[in-house]
Image: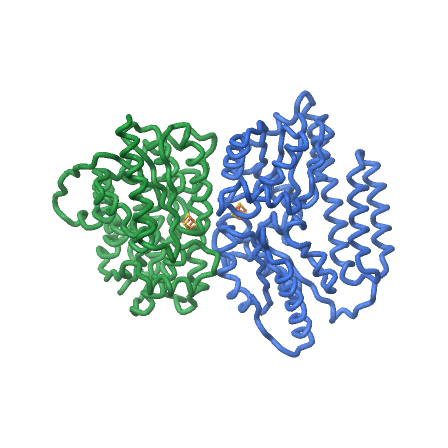
Amino acid sequence: MKVSFPYMGTPIGYKKIAALLGHEVIDPPKPTQRTIDLGVKYSPEFACFPMKVLLGSYIEAIELGADTLISSGGHGPCRAGFYGEVQSKILRSMGYDVDLIIFDSIKRDFLGFYRKVKKIKGKHSWRDVWYTLKFSYHTIKILDFLEQQIETVRAYEVHKGQSTKVWEMIEKKIDGAYSDAELDRVKKEAQEMIDEIKLVQVPEEQKIRIGIVGEIYVVMESSVNMRVEERLGELGCEVRRSQYLSEWVDFNLIPARFSPSREPEILRKGEKYIEIIIGGHAKQNMGAIVDYKEQGFDGIVHLMPFGCLPELISQSIMPKVSEDLDIPVLTLSLDEQTGRANSLTRLEAFVDLIRTRKNGKCIIQVS
Amino acid sequence: MKIGVPRALLYYYYFPLWQKLLLCLGHEVVVSPETNKEIVDLGVKKSVPEICVPIKIFNGHVENLLKKNVDYLFVPRMVSVEKGCTFCPKFLGLPDMVRSTFPELEGKLISPKIEMNSEIIAEPHCYQELKDVLNLSDKELRKALKVAKKHWLKFRSISKKGYLISEALDLVDQKTVPPFENQGDITIGLIGYVYDIYDEFVSMNVAKRMRGLGVNVVTFEMLEERIIDREVKQMSKVLFWTFSNKIFGAGMHFYRNKRVDGIIHITAFGCGPDSLLGKMLELDSEKFNKPFMTVRVDEHTGETHLQTRIEAFIDMLRKKKKKG
Ligand code: SF4
Ligand code: SF4
């Protein structure tokens, strides 16, 4: 099989699984304007933005020769089921013959999950599969661990852009590591590289911390969110996201008893604003905001794809959350024509506002 | 107590049940008027810009009822009415949205959580919140639900005779309902959510208009549930959300049914699920050699535009039929 997968944050995890199981891996192209345009052209008009970009990514991967596409879905009522079905149908109507395999939470559909793994497994033993999965999990854990450090130091780097460059190098190194020993070695190197980044000293009380919440795809995939983490870093803010790939795995693929996932706790914290899980990550986002507030964060950037059903509910509730918790929230709606300049100006104004607020001068709500 | 029920969303499917329930419990039921321009404008003001038109209209109805000084507002949280499938996320989060959009509703909202594996949503566990707020005994609730259930089943049976929901809502209070007779020369499958097709503002009475042009109109709620289920089950997975599935299943059935000459899909602006299921049905139109048309309505759609498109579609169907 010639396997490819769309970008949703780094695809390194998938890549390892596919390569170790002996498939030919087609390196997926990072989404560009062309990807988005392709997706928009062939998707139904009111399909949500991630679905359009994913379709564009599939088309580009097929153009590169992929015959099997692997992806993971969201969970809860707003799920990958209909994505996959409609996308397959559209791809077929365009004359492409591909297999679309979408992994959903193992807890929802164990049998389906098993069948899909079996399809990818080929002739390998289950022991190999187990090792592969473990190795890939280990890889993304390391990636997430390192990325969070980058998200902090980027705010204080002396040489603008250095952290981002270091991060790109780290990604490449980890991409090339195919054994536990190698991975450990690379991890040490990466740590050294991060430690070497020169930082400006900023007094604790002037540090600004921003939590990014929203729909999983636009939160994780920087090419469709105007690289909002980097932008915030450049503006001198530390950033954390409400989603990291390894956390998705922790919650969705690992049995609760063994899982280090904080998601159940986050969900409880969201209850006050959204009572039940309504799909996507709407309720988690509410919980994440409460959690960020408790951790002393200064502001929230809420990323929402155009046409996203659950996030539209979040957006409707956001003013109240912001007021209740006394934390500024900026909602950015992302689509194929997101006015970048306009959104960037809003982002800058938002950070300014937080900075002023921090200095105790004024209190305004933004939404 | 005066309990307000917005004439929006699933009002068009479950009102007979909820009305009977509240009446039997001895309360006054206040319904907002038919959607009009003023209500739409109010709703638009109260909603985030990107949200679908039906939700905007819903917000307008809530605002309208607030002005009527109701004691409570009845906004159920529709979670599920069949096994393994839920409503569109916006229904799931509706009470949360209402609560933060209208802070003045604090303490006035009754939102029982409807979670069932059947459409007949008359089980006491669904109305726990109603019971708490109105301080009901088990027995009272059970008794009222029994009456409500019977009333709703009658409403459903009227739909299945071939009457439109707008007619069934009136007929359900009559003793006897005559059989419905179709008299048109062609038959169109009209698919869309009840809150689009029967909202006079959204659909501009499209169903009645079509009948006026000598067309027999069939809709999903006129079909037996098992017919729709059968179509939906043929898909490799259950695809969408409950009512989207119903529409999709009805659409497939209309494609296969020889008596149906063409399909019209009414959709309101901004509905993601409709966009997907519309696309899937459209892709099948050629395979079944049956015309399919989408009519998308927003806050500004004009009546003449709608009328022209429908007339053209009907003409085309008639010509096609003559040719054989
Ligand atoms: S959560 Fe939003 S973006 Fe994700 S599938 Fe649902 S509607 Fe689309
Ligand atoms: S199904 Fe469509 S129209 Fe209905 S609430 Fe959901 S998005 Fe809106």
| Image location (x, y in percent) of residue A216 | 60, 49
**Could you say which is closer to the camera, residue B87 or residue B55?**
B55
Quarter of the rendering containing residue A171: top right
Q: Nearer the viewer, residue B104 or A32?
A: A32
Residues A50 and A104: in front is A50
For the residue pair B210 and A214, the one nearer the viewer reads as B210
Q: Residue at x 46, y 49 (%)?
A: B89
Residue A255 makes an appearance in the image: no
**Horizontally, is A212 left or right of B140 in the view?**
right
Q: Tag count in the figure? A: 0
Whole-percent x and y of residue B238? 45, 35
Quadrant holding the C terminus of chain A? bottom right
Q: Is residue B89 visible?
A: yes
Q: Position of residue A64 (x, y in %)?
A: 68, 32
Q: Tell me the quarter of the image containing the N terminus of chain A.
A: top right
Residue B255 image offset from top left, x and y in percent: 35, 31
Residue A138 sits in quarter: top right
The chain assigned the colour blue in the figure is: A
| Colour scheme shown | by chain
In the picture shown, does residue A60 fall above or below B19?
above
Residue furthest to the top: A123
Query: Which residue corresponds to the image point at 69% horizontal and 71% vertical from the top-left?
Result: A355
Seen as rendered, the residue at the extreme bottom is A361
Q: Which chain is tinted green? A: B
Q: Residue at x 44, y 47 (%)?
A: B88
* Left or right: A91 in relation to A354: left
Q: Which residue shows up at 47% across the image and 33% down it? A: B237
